[in-house]
Each structure stands twice: as structure tokens, then as C-alpha cells.
Image (spheres, grey):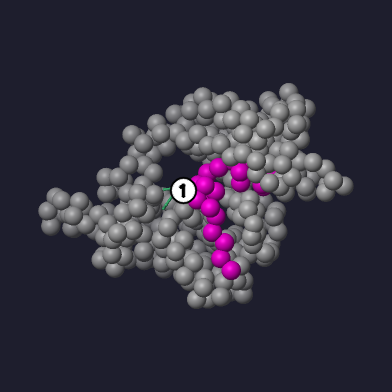
Amino acid sequence: MHTSMRHVILAIESSCDETAAAVLINGKIQSNIIAMQTIHQKYGGVVPELASRAHQQHIVPVVSAALEKAKVQKTDLTAIAFTQGPGLLGSLLVGASFAKAMALALNLPLVAVHHMQAHILSHFIDEPYPAFPFLCLTVSGGHTQIVLVKSHLEMEILGQTQDDAVGEAFDKTAKLLGLPYPGGPLIDKYAATGNPRAFSFPIVEMPGLDFSFSGIKTAFLYFLRNQSSQGPDFIQKHLPDICASMQYTLIQILMKKLKQAALQTGIREIAIAGGVSANVGLRNTLHEEGQRLGWNVYIPKFEYCTDNAAMIAVAAYYKALAGQFASQEVTPMPRMEWK
Ligand code: KG4
Ligand code: ZN
């Protein structure tokens, strides 16, 4: 029955500092609109109150643009999807309230999506799709996880960070170097021309498939303090080498656990997802290591690495196929657990 049904889904993402909307028809993305919030740059991080306000300003034009680009009328829609969590409460509330109001007005079902599961399902936006079961290294500003993906809707966390996320490690490193927020992409840029072996940073060994990134942040702070004895322009002189060395260390930590997970499970279908999967160093390393180890590697297109609504739409599509709809009483969950 479901196969003959037409699914026209409007999806809204507002978990952090990107207001995004996308339209999907029968599993295929028709539009994917993102309004970035530049206001946070001067504060060196996302300011929650300003993020909510910017979402409030952007959401109507972003949704209109997504419908227009997809050539879809509101009356064509069959469901409204939104990010339920995890994320910032005030940011999530804007997307959730908007989705609920729209569903109510159009008498449509709601689909509530888990943001991290959606990052993983971004691999079902364009073919080739990974085969189940696959492993996904999910790396963002708030999460660092190795996930065993058994089906579109069944996922199990095999390991995760016990403190900071790897995206945070990138951003905090950048901040100490005096680079603006978000620093991850800038570290990536400077690393491209630097020597990854110029400096070395200590790695904290974690048990099993878990990660820790708080130690390396502190080590980096002390490293910069010690080096400042070489003169105040140490950072300026060595920026590409510092960035390349730090990035190399972070990638080594991620790859070590990913290889361990592949060995333990015997799985060779390996994917990465989340904002940090946009990192060129990580993408290249995964590609090379994958070839060497006989893995089938899945790396999202750049536009689907960082926060977007296309991934929310795809996740909602699989939930709708499974009949997993939310009620009008649904509320945002800033610390949403894994289902
Ligand atoms: O998935 P995402 O857009 O938002 C969250 O769900 O957190 O991830 C944002 C994170 C930030 O920490 C940002 O610095 C990092 O992804 N990031 C990168 C790159 N692009 C984004 N980190 C390293 N290299 C990049 N090219
Ligand atoms: Zn994200």
C-alpha cells in the first residue's frame, strides 16, 4: 500500500544555528534551502538567544523558498517533518512550533526526527546507498559516535565521546589560534599547506570504541603557552603547520577507533557523517585507508555534511513509510536520546 502512496514531505531543521527547509517527493530531494546565521561569528560561538531570534526571522522565507524551488504547493504536501532534538531548546522550538502550526492548518501528519540519525541517513539522499549493516562515524559539533546502522530506523551506538565532540576540538583549537567561529573549516583550509608531522600532541587512550577530546584541548593550550617563548608571532609563522599537525592528530584518533570497530564487527561498509565529515583531511584519509583495507567507503557530498534539511526529509520519509508519526503534543528534546 505504501509503495503506491505519494510522499511529498516538507522538512524543517533548526537545531542549532542554521535555518533550513527541504522538500522530498517519493524519496528524492527536490529542494534544499539553508539560511546561515552569521551573527554568531563576532561572539566566537553560537549565542542561543540570538539563534532563536534568527530562526524566527528566517523560517518563513526559507520554507517558501524550499516549496517554490521544488514547484510544490502547500496543498500538495503529505507530511511535515522537523528536528525534535538534540539541539538548543529555543532553536528547536521555532522549527517544532512552525511545523506543528503548518500541520494543523493543512491537516497533515507530523514526523519528528532525531538530528543525529538524520545525519546518518544523509547517505540515502543520493545513490550509491550503503548496504546494511554499515558502520557510520558520526562527527559533528556536539557528537562523536561510531554507530552500527542495521536498517534505516535501527541504529546502535558502539562507542562515543566521553567529553568533548571532535568538532568542538576543531573549534576550540581555532579559537586559541585567534581564528573566528566556526573554526573547523579554517583549520582544514590552513592544514592543506602545512606539515602534519611538524608538531606532535599527546593522545589519551580510551577503552573500547569510546573517544575523549578534552585532554588534547588542554595539551594544545599548554603547547601554545610554551611556544610563545619563541616570540609573539609564533602562531603567525607556523599557522599551516600547527593546523596540519592538530588535524592529523584528531584524524588519527578517529581512524584508530573506526578501524577497531570494522575489525570487531567484520563490517566493511564504512560511512562518515556530520559537520566534521566535510574535513578534507578526514575525507582523504578515509578514502586511502578504505582502499588499503578493502572497505566500501561512503562520504557525503559537502552540502549534506553540515546541518541541512534534506537529511531531515530523508529520515522523515523512512519514518513515514514505517508509519512513525508524531502527535500535536510532541515537544522538542534538547538532549534527545537515541531510539
Ligand atoms: O553537523 P554540524 O553542522 O552541526 C552539529 O550538529 O553540531 O557540525 C558542525 C561542526 C563544527 O564544529 C564545525 O567546525 C565542524 O562541524 N566542521 C568542520 C569542517 N566543516 C565543519 N570541522 C573540520 N573541518 C571542516 N571542513
Ligand atoms: Zn548536525
Given residues 291 and 227, the one toward you in this image is 291
Residue 236 in percent (x, y) is at 20, 51
Does residue 231 appear in this view? Answer: yes
As drawn, 4 above or below 37: below
The residue type indicated by label 1 comes to Gly
Q: Residue at x 57, y 61 (%)?
A: 298
Residue 7 in percent (x, y) is at 76, 41
* Disc 1 secondary structure class: loop
Magenta highlight on residue 299: yes
Residue furthest out toward the right? 1
Q: Which residue carries the number 1 mark?
A: 141
Residue 172 in percent (x, y) is at 35, 49
Q: Which residues are magenta?
A: 296-316
Q: Residue at x 68, y 64 (%)?
A: 132
As drawn, 110 above or below 255: above
Does residue 337 appear in this view? Answer: no
Q: Is mark 1 within 8 Å of ligand 1?
A: yes
Q: Is residue 230 left or right of residue 96?
A: left
Residue 275 in percent (x, y) is at 48, 50
Q: Residue at x 46, y 48 (%)?
A: 141
Q: Say few, some or many: other residues with alpha carbon within 10 Å of mark 1 (under 14 / 14 to 19 / 20 or more).
A: many
Given residues 286 and 76, the one toward you in this image is 76
Q: Residue at x 54, y 48 (%)?
A: 304
Given residues 116 and 281, the one toward you in this image is 281
Q: Is residue 190 left or right of residue 107?
A: left
